[in-house]
Amino acid sequence: MRRNYARLMAVIWILCFVPILRADEKPPTGGTMTVGGRTYQLTKFAAYESGRGDEALITVLASDRNLPLERIKKTLAENDGSDDRLSLAQPYLKVVYRKSGEIQACHAWADNASFSEPDGQGLAGQVKLVGNRVQGQAILQSKSLAGGERGFSVLFDAPWGFDAATPKSKPSGPVKPTVSGKFTGNGKPARLAFVSARWRESFADKSALMLIFTEKDHSKAQRPDIKAGFGDFGGALIISFSDDGGIFGCEVGHAAHSKKPFSSLGNIRMAEFDLGEGFVTGRIATDGVQDTFDQKWEVDIKFAAPVTGRVPKPTVSKSPPAAKKSADPSTPPTPKPAVAALNVRDLPLPKDATDVEYKDLVEQMAFRSPTKVQSLANDFAKKLAEQGWKGEGGDLVTAKTAILNRTRGEATLTIMVKPAGSGSTVQIFATGLEWGEKPE
């Protein structure tokens, strides 16, 4: 009885705020969602048919940024029409309705906070199909919980299905790189004045990009992300993120830090985000001071930048080519020997290596050594050759800088060595290695 009364009052509350429309007017679209105590404006919507068991359902997705329609279609196709396994790294609200129009369930997620009402407890709203559009409303009255306030209220008029994709934003002219806001290390500010954005290799089956923020101009550098990590452009922040704004890599370099650069995901989020045609804008924030490896830092910056490079094609695993038949059918073909993947912890590091740090998420590692740059680079190169690594292009080895490129089967290493006091610091960018912890 109480549950039905609560739903009735919620419906009345909705109707009080729905404006009366003329026949030629479109219903308003939009709303807000509060998750984990933060409030998000919902401006983008998608509506499609989903299923659970034998029941056909209507699902409405809402977000503060464009929704990945192709990813949603793929999830539905691979799971017999169910979207229960849909995983998004952007703030979103999912509301599920029965075909009769009755609201059934909801799930909301944003910045590592979430809530669900799988049995419709406290939900009110309805939906209807009007031609090729879906119109309706949904509400969950705000309530304070241990994880923060939660609730939502939305009105929507969305295309039915995936044919009418939301167009990307188009700039009125060339996008000028701009960055403003706060970036501090151990309480000391650094002015990030330059920003660039480019496509990078995909991550977790999603297209991905990289943002590079620096104090000094890095626009003419071929690999600004690597040089920025070593402080060549003053303070730096390097952000890797998927095309839905989900951050999966963060490298922090600040002059006030004794240990830099370091990786820190923690409580960093893309608070605002728009990936348009050839540009990206947004806001990156930590929501307060973070403590990583005893180094305190904080960021809250807004940015805009043109995106360079091409969107990489998704990686597709290919079957090994069939071996050529021998002229003599009685002679079996000789298979090409495969090189087993090496665990990153088996790399032949110098014996005097200290402060070894493995950054599994971004496939990078770093260490320090009391040995000077040239001697360390030459000794490391010999040890790698003994392990089967081959040189890829020419090495650059000087008294102040060393860059080594190595390959072993499908694996690659880019090794950067720079002076640090009387010794050296080394950063290794790797692909094709195993990153799991080795059993003792």
Image (cartoon, rainbow, N blue to C red):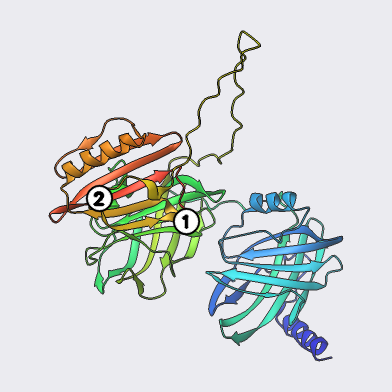
Mark 1 neighbour density, 10 Å: few (under 14) some (14–19) many (20 or more): few
Residue under circle 2?
Answer: 351
* Quadrant position of the N terminus in the picture: bottom right
Q: Nearer the viewer, residue 395 or 381?
A: 381
Quadrant for residue 199, please give it. top left
Q: CA distance from mark 1 to mark 2?
A: 21 Å
- On the rendered structure, is 32 left or right of 179? right
Estimate the x, y position of residue 107 in percent, counting from the top left.
67, 70
| Residue situated furthest front in the rendering | 440
Residue 279: percent from left, percent from top = 45, 50
Does dot 1 land on a helix, a strand or a loop?
loop
The residue shown at (59%, 18%) is: 333
SS class, disc 2: loop
| Most foreground residue, 301 or 186 | 186
Q: Is residue 110 visible?
A: yes
As drawn, the label of residue 27 is: none
Q: Quadrant of the C terminus?
A: bottom left
Residue 44 higher or lower than 298, as above or below: above
Image position, residue 423 (x, y; %): 16, 53
First in sequence: mark 1 or mark 2? 2
Say left or right for 349 vs 156: left
What residue sits 54% from the left and 70% below the top?
A: 112
Q: Which residue is mark 1?
A: 439
The residue shown at (65%, 49%) is: 70
Residue type, label 2: Lys
Q: Residues within 10 Å of mark 2 (few under 14, many from 20)?
A: few
How many discs appear?
2
Where's residue 118, x and y in %? 74, 74
In-image side of 113 versus 368 (left or right): right
